[in-house]
Amino acid sequence: MVLEGIVIHRVLYKERDLIVKLLLRNGHVGGFYVYGGMGGGKHHKPSQFEHGSMMKIHIKEQRAHKVDGSDLMIASEYQRTWEPASVRHNVQAFYLTCLYFEILQKFAFPFKLGTSDYENTETEGIFSVVSNALFYLEDSLVKNKFFPEQQLSLFMIKLIFHLGIMPDTDHCNFCGTSLMESTGATFQAASGQFACLTCVAAENEKGFLLRIKKGFQTRYADYDSLVGSTFPESDKLIQYFCHQFHLKPVELKSYKLLFR
């Protein structure tokens, strides 16, 4: 059996083996045991399991390796088909991908061999969001168009949309008034909805609302058209995501590296 996915986590085990987590094409996360995956040895082979790399893995279907109570699929052969080569040279970009993968592991379903999970395509939109986020993050670095707040905002908007928890950006949460016709709007983190300024006297965040609407309508290839994004807005999106999944942002280690 052959599986494809993005490396979202890896841990050295013993001297040269790796325990690897991949976001598979169906949006589930698979755990793999890779003998000699760290590379090295007398031929000084480099590891192919780099953070964010796209891998094709052949697995031994009849065998599993149990580590700390978890059954891991055993990789018999593997091949790297793509890697974000520029990300490792930019600290903020690297922290950003770490945050993507931490967020992902808070809700993604584990893949179980021998079940119908492989045919399950209900969550494949998650893979699409993450793969596009990595590809165009790399693209922005190559083209010298990298703005971390822009990339993070677009990722969070796309992810929230695909998870089906997008706030109502059309109507006031209280009176139902059209927010597009209203002179202003404010975001209420507790309810995860927008309200008009007639119902709630607060900061006018209509620009934030318009960027959310534009974000889920924008193709990832047009990432640089999402102008005006800020880290405070990205933070509101993360806070909203965490509220929906009963998490605290401080539980995300990479969050503290970007928002310190």
Image (cartoon, helix red, strand yellow):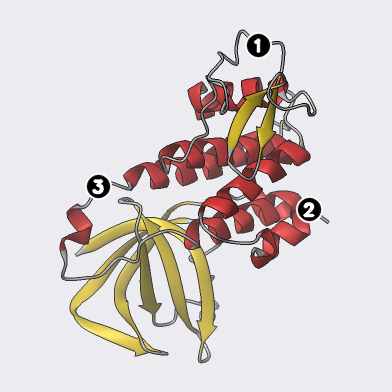
- Report the residue at 45% width, 72% height from top: 20
Contact check, label 3 and label 2, Cβ < 8 Å: no
- Amino acid, disc 1: Ser
> Label 1 neighbourhood size at 10 Å, few (<14), some (14-19), many (20+)?
some
- In the image, 152 versus 179, the foreground residue is 179
Q: Earlier in the sequence, mark 3 or mark 1?
A: 3
Read off the residue under disc 2.
Answer: 259
Residue 53 rendering spot, x and y as whole percentages: 49, 56
- Amino acid, disc 3: Thr
- Label 3 to label 2, Cα distance in Å? 34 Å
- Report the residue at 49% width, 42% height from top: 159
- In the image, 192 versus 200, the foreground residue is 200
Contact check, label 1 and label 2, Cβ < 8 Å: no
- Report the residue at 72% width, 53% height from top: 89
Read off the residue under disc 3.
Answer: 121
SS state under label 3: loop
Read off the residue under disc 1.
Answer: 182
